[in-house]
Amino acid sequence: MKIVGLSGSNVGSKTRTTMKYVSEKLTSHYPHVDWTFIDLADYTMQFSDGRNYLDYEGDTAYITKTIMEADAIIIGTPIFQASIPATLKNVFDLLPINALQDKIVSFFVTAGTSKHFLIPETQLKPILSYMKAQTVSTYVFIEEKDFMNKEIINDDIIFRLDALVEDTVMLTDTYKRIREEKESMYDF
């Protein structure tokens, strides 16, 4: 099982801090998972210009191909100016419309204030649905007050992140098994 962690911004630390926690939880509790962490801050991405994702080179090709080969994706994104960052939207724009079909996608959101709690519902979920993702029904919304010294200090957030990781792995396993059983019914 291949799971990709995608930190959807090239600035800031809260999303990166949370993804570090998710990464440690996933690798320590699910060693059978092939985990790849992509922090967009570490890559130089090209802007989408309508080409097929296979026609890009360098970091852009690596990121799009890695996402396309994944069974599941855990997205972490901050909210800036009441919106998802352009870096994350660009990743979606680089991929084909059915890129997330048959993939489990879960996510968490970091924000400076609770005023942004509906942004995932109004922006991120519609994009994931349009791209045919099977989304984990709950996500984790994390505010500025839940961090101190680049650590998550809210036990409820930690509990919910643990559940997000568990749900992602469990749903990916289940969905993969159902798909394999269905495909085995055909003799080609």
Image (tube, rainbow, N blue to C red):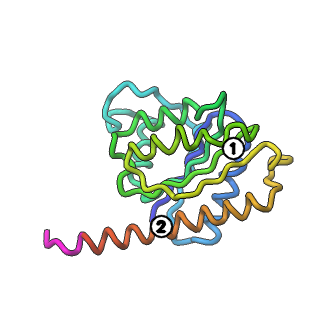
Image position of 45 (left or right of 27): left
Location of the C terminus (image quadrant): bottom left
Residue visible at 52% across and 41% down in the picture: 124
| Magenta-span inclusion, residue 186 | yes
**Residue 186 coordinates in the image, percent (x, y):** 16, 71
Q: Find residue 21 and report its image quarter.
A: bottom right
| Magenta-span inclusion, residue 127 | no
Q: Secondary structure at mark 1?
A: strand
Residue visible at 60% across and 54% down in the picture: 139
Could you tell me what secondary structure mostly forms the magenta stretch? loop
Location of the N terminus (image quadrant): bottom left
Residue segment shown in magenta? 183-188
> Dot 2: few (<14), some (14–19), or many (≥20) neighbours within 10 Å?
some
Q: Which mark, by number, is residue 110?
A: 1
Q: Find residue 130 and report its image quarter.
A: top left
Residue under label 2: 171
Q: Earlier in the sequence, mark 1 or mark 2?
A: 1
| Circle 1: residue type | Thr
| Circle 2: residue type | Leu
Residue visible at 48% across and 32% down in the picture: 90
